[in-house]
Image (cartoon, rainbow, N blue to C red):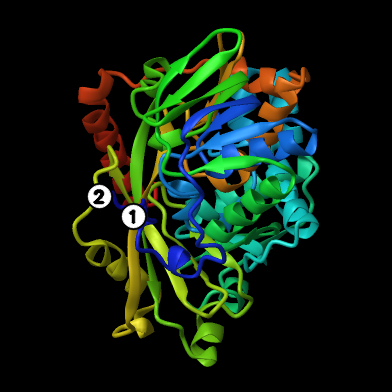
Amino acid sequence: MSSPVHANSYYAASANDKALRPQLNGEQRCDVCVVGAGFTGISTALSLAEKGKRVIVLEGSRIGFGASGRNGGQIVNSFNRDLDYITQHYGQEIGKKMAKMAFAGSELIRQRIAKYEIDCDLKQGNIFAACNQKQFNELKAKKALWEANGHQELELLDADSIQQHIGTERYVGGLLDYKGGHIQPLNLVLGQAQAFEQLGGIIYEDSQVIELQQGQPGKVITAQGQVIADQIVVAGNAYVFGLLPEIEKKAMPCGTQVIATEPLPKEVQEKLLPSDRCVEDCNYLLDYFRLSGDGRLIYGGGTTYGARDPGKIEAIIVPKMLKTFPYLKGVNIDYAWTGNFLLTMMRMPQVGKIGDNLYYAQGYSGHGVTNSHLMGEILSDAIEGDTDRFDVFASMPQYPFPGGRMLRVPYTAVGAAYYNLRDKLGI
């Protein structure tokens, strides 16, 4: 039987740790069993191990196999819905509490990288790029909103100054967040996994969970074994199937596509992104791009609702790249891959507890790098009895997508087409 492998991505090719962890065989006992070895699962496991808990992580494929090892690698602050929306829809009290957490994920990532000396090509700063005046006005409002909530490390860029950061005339302005940044995401999760193991944690790969049995204690069952645990954390996000139907119906897997060019000459790199920040535009169906540690342009975008893998990723993404950087015509594309993230109806993370001892977190809706790290700490604190931050998220309503599995994809695709038209018209 063949061993599981990562998607054929630049991240997998440049991974610092390619060792395959063993498969679970037989019975194991621990304090907490975490299902899923992506950012959420590993962040939770590492935080618990730092507190002295005996933790076992079960991964159906490889560490970082899903969105954690395939994303754009951008450290973007706040949530998919920003703080003004949260306050408007959930009230002042929740708005204030969420504001205290909106910028915590990026800080935690930097702390972990420094503490555990993780080599993941960390670079500082991300730019939100406005394609039209309406979007630029919204960025002005975002700057004021974030500053009012304590985040001061922001710079508004007009049409001239943004070209000092991005070598294109496509954008009318932007917002530079000095507390954002970018990383090689697979190496980030692998580095934290190694830190977890150094603290005594155990990770089993190629160990897909087929059944959860709640109780005191609970059981997490795979084809070859089982883990008996006092607490269970389900952290598989878009890659959990059939384990918890009650939470799976509340979110929808969506695919995004990414390409990586050949390593570019230094003068081309400096023309593309002179300050080496990462960039995402402000469209609903957004483009995002950055330079890798070895000088490749990593460019992503596009959305396939229902997580259908497109047959030709290059045909989707290369035209987007050339619209932004026409002078890259003819550049070689060394890697092209797709990955799934999880979208929720309200575009807010879904966090909760089922029964006495089963926790879950999912649905970061495109803001998973920072939110998943934060969620690991929140879940860890809740298991230890500190539920203050957990309760904020858990108190938010979690709506299922209308129409169930059959209709939620076309419903959402129609909505995406509507917002895509708004992007094109600039309204």
Q: Is residue 176 above or below residue 97?
A: below
- Residue 301: x %, y % from top left: 37, 57
Q: Quadrant of residue 212?
A: top left
Q: Quadrant of residue 145?
A: top right
Mark 2 closeness class: few <14, some 14–19, many ≥20 residues within 10 Å: some
Q: For the residues labelled 1 and 2, say whether their Cβ atoms are less than 8 Å apart.
A: yes
Q: Quadrant of residue 46?
A: top right
Residue 22's mark?
Answer: none
Quote the CA–CA distance across marks 1 and 2. Answer: 7 Å
Mark 1 closeness class: few <14, some 14–19, many ≥20 residues within 10 Å: many
In the visual, does 202 lie left or right of 263? Answer: right
Three-letter amino acid code at disc 1? Answer: Thr
Q: Give the residue drawn at x 45%, y 47%.
A: 67
- Foreground pick, 287 / 372: 372
- Residue 395: x %, y % from top left: 61, 14
Q: Which structural element holds mark 2?
A: loop
Q: Give the residue drawn at x 28%, y 49%.
A: 1
Residue 338's mark?
Answer: 1
Q: Give the residue drawn at x 43%, y 46%.
A: 66
Three-letter amino acid code at disc 2? Answer: Asp
Taking the image as drawn, is residue 169 in sight? no
Q: Earlier in the sequence, mark 1 or mark 2?
A: 2
Q: Is residue 21 above or below residue 398?
A: below
- Foreground pick, 308 / 280: 308
Q: Which structural element holds mark 1?
A: strand
Q: Which residue is mark 2?
A: 309
- Residue 147: x %, y % from top left: 76, 46
